[in-house]
Amino acid sequence: MSTPIIAAPVGEPHVMAFTADVAPDSKAIAIPCDLVEGAEVGQCIQVVSDHCAAHGGHMVLGWAIWEWPGAFIEAEYHAAWANPTGELIDIAPRRDGAYRTITFLPDARLTDTGKKIDNIRRPLVNDRDVKQFLFLAQRQTEIFNHPSVTEQRDDFDPSRLPKALIKELLDLFKKQDRLQQRLLQRYPGG
Protein backbone atom coordinates (compact mmCIF):
# COMPACT_ATOMS: atom_id res chain seq x y z
CA MET A 1 0.00 0.00 0.00
CA SER A 2 1.44 3.36 -0.97
CA THR A 3 1.32 6.62 0.92
CA PRO A 4 -1.35 9.20 0.08
CA ILE A 5 1.22 11.80 -0.95
CA ILE A 6 -0.22 14.69 -2.96
CA ALA A 7 1.11 17.90 -4.44
CA ALA A 8 0.68 20.35 -1.57
CA PRO A 9 -2.24 22.69 -2.26
CA VAL A 10 -0.91 26.09 -3.36
CA GLY A 11 -2.36 28.95 -1.34
CA GLU A 12 -3.23 26.99 1.79
CA PRO A 13 -1.93 28.80 4.91
CA HIS A 14 0.20 25.87 6.15
CA VAL A 15 1.75 25.46 2.68
CA MET A 16 2.47 29.18 2.38
CA ALA A 17 4.08 29.24 5.85
CA PHE A 18 6.21 26.20 5.05
CA THR A 19 7.39 27.46 1.66
CA ALA A 20 8.20 30.88 3.17
CA ASP A 21 10.60 29.08 5.52
CA VAL A 22 12.12 26.96 2.73
CA ALA A 23 12.67 29.75 0.16
CA PRO A 24 11.69 33.13 1.60
CA ASP A 25 12.25 35.03 -1.66
CA SER A 26 10.04 32.80 -3.78
CA LYS A 27 6.43 31.70 -4.13
CA ALA A 28 5.11 28.19 -4.74
CA ILE A 29 3.18 27.65 -7.96
CA ALA A 30 1.35 24.76 -9.56
CA ILE A 31 3.12 23.67 -12.74
CA PRO A 32 1.91 21.15 -15.32
CA CYS A 33 3.56 17.79 -15.81
CA ASP A 34 4.52 16.65 -19.30
CA LEU A 35 6.90 13.80 -18.59
CA VAL A 36 9.62 12.88 -21.06
CA GLU A 37 8.81 9.37 -22.22
CA GLY A 38 11.62 6.91 -21.63
CA ALA A 39 13.58 9.30 -19.38
CA GLU A 40 15.30 7.84 -16.35
CA VAL A 41 13.15 7.89 -13.24
CA GLY A 42 14.43 9.93 -10.31
CA GLN A 43 17.04 11.84 -12.32
CA CYS A 44 15.45 15.28 -12.76
CA ILE A 45 18.75 17.17 -13.17
CA GLN A 46 19.94 14.94 -16.03
CA VAL A 47 16.49 14.75 -17.65
CA VAL A 48 16.09 18.54 -17.66
CA SER A 49 19.70 19.11 -18.82
CA ASP A 50 19.24 16.73 -21.75
CA HIS A 51 15.86 18.28 -22.61
CA CYS A 52 17.33 21.80 -22.60
CA ALA A 53 20.10 20.69 -24.95
CA ALA A 54 17.56 19.19 -27.36
CA HIS A 55 14.72 21.72 -27.10
CA GLY A 56 16.12 24.96 -25.69
CA GLY A 57 14.90 26.65 -22.58
CA HIS A 58 16.69 26.38 -19.27
CA MET A 59 16.70 24.52 -15.96
CA VAL A 60 15.11 26.00 -12.84
CA LEU A 61 16.15 24.47 -9.53
CA GLY A 62 13.82 24.48 -6.59
CA TRP A 63 11.60 22.28 -4.50
CA ALA A 64 8.64 20.06 -5.27
CA ILE A 65 6.26 20.51 -2.35
CA TRP A 66 4.47 17.33 -1.24
CA GLU A 67 2.04 16.62 1.54
CA TRP A 68 0.69 13.58 3.30
CA PRO A 69 -2.59 15.24 4.33
CA GLY A 70 -2.86 15.55 8.08
CA ALA A 71 0.58 14.04 8.70
CA PHE A 72 3.46 16.04 7.19
CA ILE A 73 4.63 18.37 4.44
CA GLU A 74 7.98 18.22 2.67
CA ALA A 75 10.09 19.99 0.10
CA GLU A 76 11.99 17.75 -2.33
CA TYR A 77 14.98 19.15 -4.26
CA HIS A 78 13.82 19.22 -7.87
CA ALA A 79 14.55 20.61 -11.33
CA ALA A 80 11.87 21.93 -13.67
CA TRP A 81 12.20 22.87 -17.31
CA ALA A 82 11.53 26.46 -18.36
CA ASN A 83 10.59 26.15 -22.03
CA PRO A 84 11.81 28.78 -24.53
CA THR A 85 8.79 30.99 -23.69
CA GLY A 86 9.56 30.74 -19.95
CA GLU A 87 6.72 28.40 -18.91
CA LEU A 88 7.77 26.03 -16.13
CA ILE A 89 6.99 22.36 -16.76
CA ASP A 90 7.79 19.24 -14.75
CA ILE A 91 9.23 16.77 -17.25
CA ALA A 92 11.06 14.24 -15.04
CA PRO A 93 9.35 10.89 -14.33
CA ARG A 94 8.89 9.95 -10.67
CA ARG A 95 9.18 6.64 -8.85
CA ASP A 96 5.81 7.13 -7.20
CA GLY A 97 3.86 7.65 -10.41
CA ALA A 98 2.65 10.51 -12.54
CA TYR A 99 0.87 13.68 -11.52
CA ARG A 100 -1.06 16.17 -13.67
CA THR A 101 0.53 19.06 -11.79
CA ILE A 102 3.04 19.49 -9.01
CA THR A 103 3.60 22.30 -6.57
CA PHE A 104 6.98 23.83 -7.36
CA LEU A 105 8.95 26.38 -5.36
CA PRO A 106 11.75 27.94 -7.43
CA ASP A 107 14.86 28.66 -5.33
CA ALA A 108 17.58 30.76 -6.96
CA ARG A 109 19.96 29.92 -4.08
CA LEU A 110 20.24 26.27 -5.15
CA THR A 111 23.02 24.77 -7.25
CA ASP A 112 23.58 21.24 -8.48
CA THR A 113 26.33 19.68 -6.36
CA GLY A 114 25.83 16.13 -7.60
CA LYS A 115 25.09 15.02 -4.04
CA LYS A 116 21.67 13.87 -2.87
CA ILE A 117 20.00 16.76 -1.08
CA ASP A 118 17.73 15.74 1.73
CA ASN A 119 14.11 16.81 1.74
CA ILE A 120 12.99 19.48 4.15
CA ARG A 121 10.23 17.98 6.27
CA ARG A 122 7.76 19.33 8.80
CA PRO A 123 5.13 17.39 10.73
CA LEU A 124 1.59 18.76 10.51
CA VAL A 125 0.58 17.04 13.73
CA ASN A 126 2.16 16.29 17.08
CA ASP A 127 2.45 12.53 16.54
CA ARG A 128 5.46 10.51 17.65
CA ASP A 129 5.05 8.08 14.73
CA VAL A 130 5.05 10.92 12.18
CA LYS A 131 8.19 12.39 13.75
CA GLN A 132 9.87 8.95 13.73
CA PHE A 133 8.86 8.40 10.10
CA LEU A 134 10.46 11.74 9.13
CA PHE A 135 13.59 10.97 11.17
CA LEU A 136 13.99 7.62 9.39
CA ALA A 137 13.67 9.37 6.01
CA GLN A 138 16.42 11.77 7.06
CA ARG A 139 18.66 8.92 8.19
CA GLN A 140 18.08 7.14 4.88
CA THR A 141 19.44 10.17 3.00
CA GLU A 142 22.45 10.29 5.32
CA ILE A 143 23.21 6.67 4.44
CA PHE A 144 22.70 7.34 0.72
CA ASN A 145 25.28 10.12 1.01
CA HIS A 146 27.86 7.95 2.78
CA PRO A 147 31.37 8.55 1.37
CA SER A 148 31.55 4.96 0.11
CA VAL A 149 28.87 5.80 -2.46
CA THR A 150 30.90 7.51 -5.15
CA GLU A 151 28.55 7.73 -8.13
CA GLN A 152 25.89 10.04 -6.72
CA ARG A 153 23.81 10.23 -9.89
CA ASP A 154 23.38 6.47 -10.28
CA ASP A 155 20.59 4.59 -8.64
CA PHE A 156 21.65 3.87 -5.12
CA ASP A 157 23.76 0.73 -4.88
CA PRO A 158 23.81 -0.52 -1.28
CA SER A 159 26.59 -3.01 -2.07
CA ARG A 160 29.03 -0.08 -1.93
CA LEU A 161 28.19 0.53 1.75
CA PRO A 162 29.97 -0.97 4.75
CA LYS A 163 28.12 -4.05 6.06
CA ALA A 164 26.98 -2.25 9.22
CA LEU A 165 25.27 0.45 7.15
CA ILE A 166 23.66 -2.13 4.87
CA LYS A 167 22.18 -3.78 7.96
CA GLU A 168 21.04 -0.40 9.31
CA LEU A 169 19.44 0.45 5.98
CA LEU A 170 17.54 -2.84 5.85
CA ASP A 171 16.33 -2.33 9.43
CA LEU A 172 15.36 1.22 8.57
CA PHE A 173 13.23 0.04 5.62
CA LYS A 174 11.41 -2.44 7.89
CA LYS A 175 10.74 0.26 10.48
CA GLN A 176 9.52 2.65 7.79
CA ASP A 177 7.12 0.01 6.44
CA ARG A 178 5.68 -0.67 9.91
CA LEU A 179 5.31 3.05 10.63
CA GLN A 180 3.71 3.65 7.24
CA GLN A 181 1.07 1.01 7.96
CA ARG A 182 0.24 2.64 11.32
CA LEU A 183 0.17 6.12 9.79
CA LEU A 184 -2.15 5.00 6.99
CA GLN A 185 -4.65 3.96 9.65
CA ARG A 186 -4.60 7.44 11.22
CA TYR A 187 -3.97 9.60 8.13
CA PRO A 188 -5.50 7.84 5.12
CA GLY A 189 -5.43 11.02 3.00
CA GLY A 190 -7.86 12.08 0.26
Image (tube, rainbow, N blue to C red):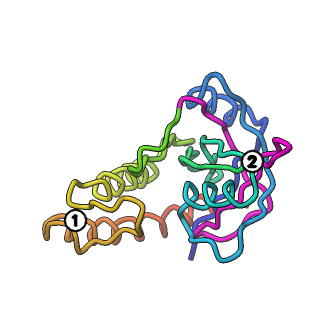
- Disc on res. 64: none
- Is 182 located above or below residue 10 in the figure? below
Q: Residue at x 33, y 62 (%)?
A: 151
How packed is label 1: few (under 14 Cα within 10 Å), some, or many (20 or more)?
A: some
Q: Do the residues labelled 2 and 1 touch (CB within 8 Å)?
A: no
Question: Which segment is the magenta one?
Answer: 82-109
Q: Residue at x 40, y 55 (%)?
A: 137
> Among all residues in the image, which is located at the extreme right?
85
Task: Give the residue number, with chain letter if any, for mark 1.
Answer: 168
| CA separation in Å, label 2 and label 1 | 42 Å
| Quadrant of the rendering where the N terminus is positioned | bottom right
Disc 2 residue type (three-letter): Gly
Q: Where is residue 169 in the image (x, y as percent from the top left)?
A: 27, 66
Question: Could you tell me which secondary element the residue under label 1 belongs to?
Answer: helix
Q: Which of marks 2 and 1 is nearer the N terminus?
A: 2
Q: Where, by quadrant of the figure, is residue 176 drawn?
A: bottom left
Residue 69 belongs to magenta span: no
> Among all residues in the image, which is located at the extreme top?
25
Q: Which of marks 2 and 1 is in front?
A: 2
Disc 1 residue type (three-letter): Glu
How packed is label 2: few (under 14 Cα within 10 Å), some, or many (20 or more)?
A: some
Task: Give the residue number, with chain letter if any, for mark 2.
Answer: 57
Residue 128 visible somewhere in the drawing:
no
- Is 90 located above or below residue 125 in the figure? below
Q: Where is residue 104 in the image (x, y as percent from the top left)?
A: 69, 44
- Is 97 located above or below residue 19 in the figure? below
Q: Position of residue 146 (x, y in %)?
A: 24, 55
Residue placed most toward the observer, 67 or 156: 156
Q: Where, by quadrant of the figure, is residue 9 drawn?
A: top right
Main structural element of the magenta stretch: helix, strand or loop?
Answer: loop
Position of 121 with respect to 4 (left or right) is: left
